Amino acid sequence: MKKTIKCEKTIHEGYKEWERAKEAGSEIPQLFGKYHYFYSSKNGEISLIELKNYFKQGDDFWEIYSLKGNLFEDTERFPTKKQAEKRIEELL
């Protein structure tokens, strides 16, 4: 039986704040990717975001967090969105 996983894509609130600050002349670094993804199934809900230059070494990470269903503890980070989505599919 195939799982039904839904995905909702929104603009990340941290990204919106960064854009407003940039328009106001601030030179703060971008910390979040533009989009915030919410994956859900009957088993729970998982948030996925991109962290920009997370360790200040030029590396971006994709982070997942269990919003509903206690699917895993804390957060998990991945070097690519594809790897994060593979883990989400396993969990949901």
Image (cartoon, helix red, strand yellow):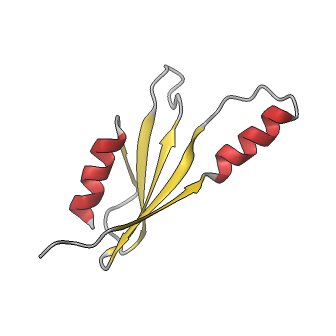
Q: Position of residue 33 (x, y in %)?
A: 55, 40
Quarter of the image with the N terminus in it: bottom left
Taking the image as shown, residue 27 lies to the left or right of residue 6, namely right
* Foreground of the two, 36 or 76: 36
Q: Position of residue 59 (x, y in %)?
A: 45, 25
What is the tally of numbered marks visible in this picture? 0
Q: Quadrant of the C terminus?
A: bottom left
The image quarter containing residue 80 is top left
Residue appearing at x 16%, y 72% in the figure: 2
Q: Residue furthest right?
A: 24
Residue reaching furthest to the left: 1
Up the image or down, 58 lies above or below 47; here it is: above
Q: Position of residue 13 (x, y in %)?
A: 66, 53
Q: Is residue 61 left or right of residue 56?
A: left
- Choose between 2 and 55: the one closer to the eye: 2
Residue 21: name its quadrant.
top right
Q: Nearer the viewer, residue 5 or 59?
A: 5
**Residue lying at the far bottom of the rendered structure:** 42
Say which residue appears at 38% left-offset and 70% top-offset: 40
56 lies above or below 34: above
Q: Nearer the viewer, residue 37 or 26?
A: 37
| Above/below status of 71 relative to 63 | below
Residue at image coords 40%, 57%: 74
Where residue 87 sits in the image (x, y, percent)? Answer: 26, 53
